[in-house]
Image: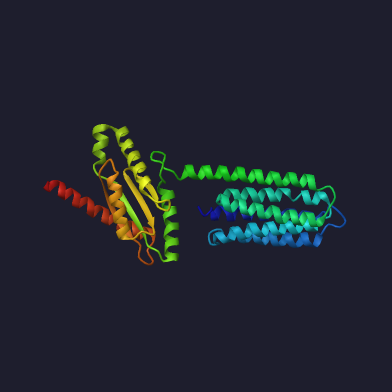
């Protein structure tokens, strides 16, 4: 999973906007005589501009902008910690650290979120230690622990929700939306690397007859049995999904037409029911829609051939 780009940009806009407002309040009503008013004023303006940029660019900016926004927020928070003249000023930055962690845990894959939070904790703590205000250490450690715990909770909760949202509840494979998202990413990766990638559509033969004669429970059992058997034959890099009804799809990175044909032979050998397949290996510039259209044409060509052979037999 690469992260939720649009949601991340909108949440960054909100976070930067709130931070800008807090900096403006700090500049207008300083907490101490040595409060860095000029710095707070500059950060208020910069935060407001960045908030607007993230909000207006939510449909155009790349995922790298989310990573850059989080890293910049950590650096600016560290700068404020370094310039703080009181323990209250340092500890008051704790909520910004917590917000950064929760946002990262919500929109990024777990390893990336954890890396951002560890980096933020390190640089902001370094800034706080450089400021050396007395009496800040114990409450600051509390803020750090709170950040780490809440980030981890957000990472795990978001991961569980994403897995549930992207899983077909009957067969346990990817559902249509998750499969299409994954297929798009695998196609893009293969195109950048110049490697082959093949899409396969699989459609059960006579599935309606199974439901009509043996009942829907038998049909469901057949779907589950096939999905389980197929998954045992696939590599970790292969993506199997159920598009709906009795139709499944595979995306096979690194597989050309010959390798795909060999895989289909293995899948047929472990299958408990008959099915037809259509394949399409990506050509330069092919998108998922074009691949699916070619695979669909090949699938119905095979179905027609199977039907003809059955009538002849």
Looking at the image, the residue that sits furthest to the left is: 312
Left or right: 134 in relation to 217: right
* Residue nearest the viewer, comparing 250 with 68: 250
Q: How is the image coloured?
A: rainbow
Residue shown at 33% from the left, 39% from the top: 225
Evaluate whether residue 120 shows in this view.
Answer: yes
- Exactly how many numbered labels are in the figure? 0
- Compared with residue 133, is residue 195 higher up or lower down, i.e. above or below? below
Q: Quadrant of residue 128?
A: bottom right
Looking at the image, the residue that sits furthest to the right is: 33
Residue 41 position within the rendered picture, expressed as x and y whole percent measured from the top left: 77, 61
Left or right: 307 in relation to 69: left
Residue shown at 39% from the left, 38% from the top: 170
Evaluate whether residue 20 shows in this view.
Answer: no
- Compared with residue 68, is residue 153 higher up or lower down, i.e. above or below? above
Residue 223 position within the rendered picture, expressed as x and y whole percent measured from the top left: 33, 40
Residue 92 position within the rendered picture, expressed as x and y whole percent measured from the top left: 76, 49
Residue shown at 42% from the left, 62% from the top: 190
- Compared with residue 27, is residue 94 higher up or lower down, i.e. above or below? above
Residue 90 position within the rendered picture, expressed as x and y whole percent measured from the top left: 78, 51
């Amino acid at each position: 999973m690469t992260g939720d780009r649009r949601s991340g940009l909108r949440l960054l806009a909100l976070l930067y906007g709130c931070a800008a407002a807090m900096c403006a309040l700090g500049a207008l009503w300083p907490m101490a005589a040595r409060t860095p008013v000029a710095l707070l004023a500059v950060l208020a303006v910069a935060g407001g501009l960045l908030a607007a940029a993230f909000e207006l660019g939510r449909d155009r900016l790349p995922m790298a902008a989310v990573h850059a926004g989080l890293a910049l927020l950590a650096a600016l928070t560290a700068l404020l910690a370094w310039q703080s003249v009181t323990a209250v000023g340092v500890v008051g930055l704790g909520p910004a650290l917590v917000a950064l962690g929760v946002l990262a845990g919500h929109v990024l894959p777990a390893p990336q979120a954890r890396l951002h939070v560890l980096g933020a904790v390190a640089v902001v703590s370094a800034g706080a230690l450089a400021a050396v205000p007395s009496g800040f250490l114990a409450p600051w450690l509390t803020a750090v622990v709170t950040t780490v715990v809440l980030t981890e909770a957000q990472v795990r909760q978001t991961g569980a929700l994403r897995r549930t949202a992207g899983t077909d509840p009957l067969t346990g494979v990817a559902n249509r939306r998750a499969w299409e998202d994954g297929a798009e990413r695998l196609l893009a990766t293969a195109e950048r690397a110049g490697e082959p990638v093949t899409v396969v559509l699989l459609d059960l033969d006579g599935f309606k007859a199974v439901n009509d004669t043996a009942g829907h429970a038998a049909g469901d059992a057949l779907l589950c049995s096939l999905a389980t058997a197929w998954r045992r034959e696939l590599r970790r890099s292969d993506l199997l999904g159920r598009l709906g009804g009795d139709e499944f799809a595979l995306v096979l990175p690194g597989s050309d037409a010959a390798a795909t044909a060999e895989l289909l032979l293995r899948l047929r050998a472990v299958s408990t029911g008959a099915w037809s397949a259509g394949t399409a290996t990506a050509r330069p510039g092919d998108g998922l829609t074009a691949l699916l259209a070619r695979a669909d044409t090949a699938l119905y060509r095979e179905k027609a051939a199977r039907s003809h052979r059955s009538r002849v037999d």
